[in-house]
Amino acid sequence: MSNRFSKITPEISRLSELCLQNSTIDPSLHEKYDVKRGLRDLTGKGVLTGLTEISEIIAHEVIDGKEYPCEGKLYYRGIDIEEIVDGFIKENRFGFEEIAYLLMFGQLPKAQELGDFARLLDNYRSLPTSFVRDVIMKAPSKDMMNTLARSVLTMYSYDERAEDNSLPNVLRQCLQLIALFPLLAVYGYQAYCHYHGKQSLYIHSPKPGLSTAENILHMLRLDSQYTPLEARILDLALVLHAEHGGGNNSSFTVHVVTSSGTDTYSAITAAIGSLKGFRHGGANIKVSRMFEDMKANIKDWTDESSVTDYLIKLLNKEAFDRSGLIYGMGHAIYSLSDPRVNVLKKFVERLSKEKNRMEEFQLYSLVEKLAPKIIAEKRRMYKGVSANVDFYSGLVYYMLDLPIQLYTPLFAIARIAGWSAHRMEEIINVNKIIRPSYKSVATLKKYIPLADR
């Protein structure tokens, strides 16, 4: 049954060729009709489609009416992310819960408010009775993002007010999802290991009073043990992934789907589907696998010429997945630098020392130095190229000994905070379905009766 279900038959192959033949659009028509492909203009700048107060990305500055690249900046609710991180790091606090509060409610919480918010999330860290057995344990997927999406969509069935799109109810649903995402992802992974890897099944319940990052490590590891630095750097990764401008693909998906009037579970599931893609949240997996291939094919990781040769092979489609890409390098908005990398890299080095993996950190640093020059030369790019957050987040998860199957779900565990803020912002401010225009370029034809075809 399973083989028949998944098999691509000769008939399907023939029909797919028919799709290709009759659905391929001449690329020159995009320029002819001034179509903003990917909602971007010819310079790559995003088309303005909405307003938001949730976050902002700065990658250019205007001087005498002209735009020039500048060091990247990221703001959450108008506050520089680097200042936010400095704040909770200096006070030796975890930051994700504070960030979730800021994104959703538009202001930094006071101490009492932050404590109450953390306890509220604690109270919501409990799945419905038999949910693990009846949903997560049945037909476990090999891809944790699919498991996460199925779990979120199924939660609709357990919510007596699933269709209530009033702000208080949507807020309640979003808070529950923020609290439950770590459980859904980790338990989904444990079920996968049990059924597909024949490993022993163990389920740790979350502990009240622990941060989101601590609970992830507690639930995931057999012995529930972790070091303070491990928890701090995982928390930092969650903070840096929580939101990234209203125009990122998954957040825009939330706006689009929310505008149709659908329920919270459907809107968030759509965002999960977006984030899964390797051009979005799945990029950190590609980075990690690329480096595994690099380490296997380069004898001396410190030799610049050997690393350069490998990077050139990547661009020439002669190495790794032959896509012609150096994963983790470049960004749709940032050119000179990604501010999230600037924050994360300092802590990655500390973690590398704790884990005795400095050789790998130095390899990443070498690639970060060499790749922009090689890309600029080989691709004749004049827009600056720099490492993006996926470049180092994959290394962080690797050094934390987290399974690669959870890399993208960890992104989702963080980004659900931003998605929740965007869903509420759309509900509060807009009462109109998002409907972009597509121009038909099909040739008009006469209908031919079946007997004459």
Image (cartoon, grey):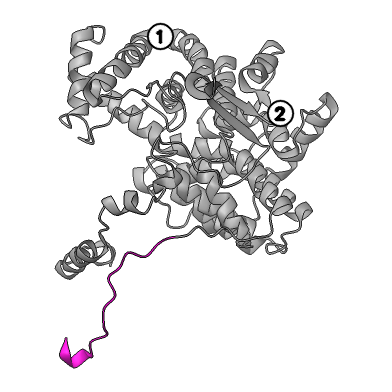
Please tell me whether residue 356 belongs to the stretch shown in magenta.
no
Amino acid type assigned to the residue bearing label 1 in the image: Asn
Residue at the disc numbered 2: 98
Q: Would you say 111 lies left or right of 254 here? A: right
In x, y percent, where is residue 192? 41, 46
Crowding at dot 1, Cα within 10 Å, few <14 / some 14-19 / many 20+, comes out as few
Crowding at dot 2, Cα within 10 Å, few <14 / some 14-19 / many 20+, comes out as many
Q: Looking at the figure, which quarter contains the C terminus?
A: bottom left
Please tell me whether residue 447 belongs to the stretch shown in magenta.
yes
Check the image and name the residue furthest to the right: 112
Work out whether mark 2 precedes mark 1 in sequence or the reverse, and give the earlier one: 2
Q: CA distance from mark 2 to mark 1?
A: 31 Å
Element type at mark 2 = helix
Amino acid type assigned to the residue bearing label 2 in the image: Glu
Q: Looking at the figure, which quarter contains the N terminus?
A: bottom left
Question: Overall secondary structure of the magenta stretch?
Answer: loop
Identify the residue at horizontal 40%, vertical 21% (top origin). Answer: 387
Identify the residue at horizontal 64%, vertical 18% (top origin). Answer: 85
Q: Is residue 144 visible?
A: no
In x, y percent, where is residue 441? 32, 64
How many marks overall? 2
Span colored in magenta:
438-453
Q: In this orientation, which residue lies closer to the viewer: 105 or 147?
A: 105
Find residue 280 and report its image quarter. top left
In x, y percent, where is residue 208? 71, 33
Against 144, residue 139 (above or below) is below
Q: In this orientation, which residue lies closer to the viewer: 287 or 211?
A: 287
Residue at the disc numbered 1: 356
Q: Would you say 412 lies left or right of 95 here? A: left
Q: Disc 2 vs disc 1: which is toward the camera?
A: 2
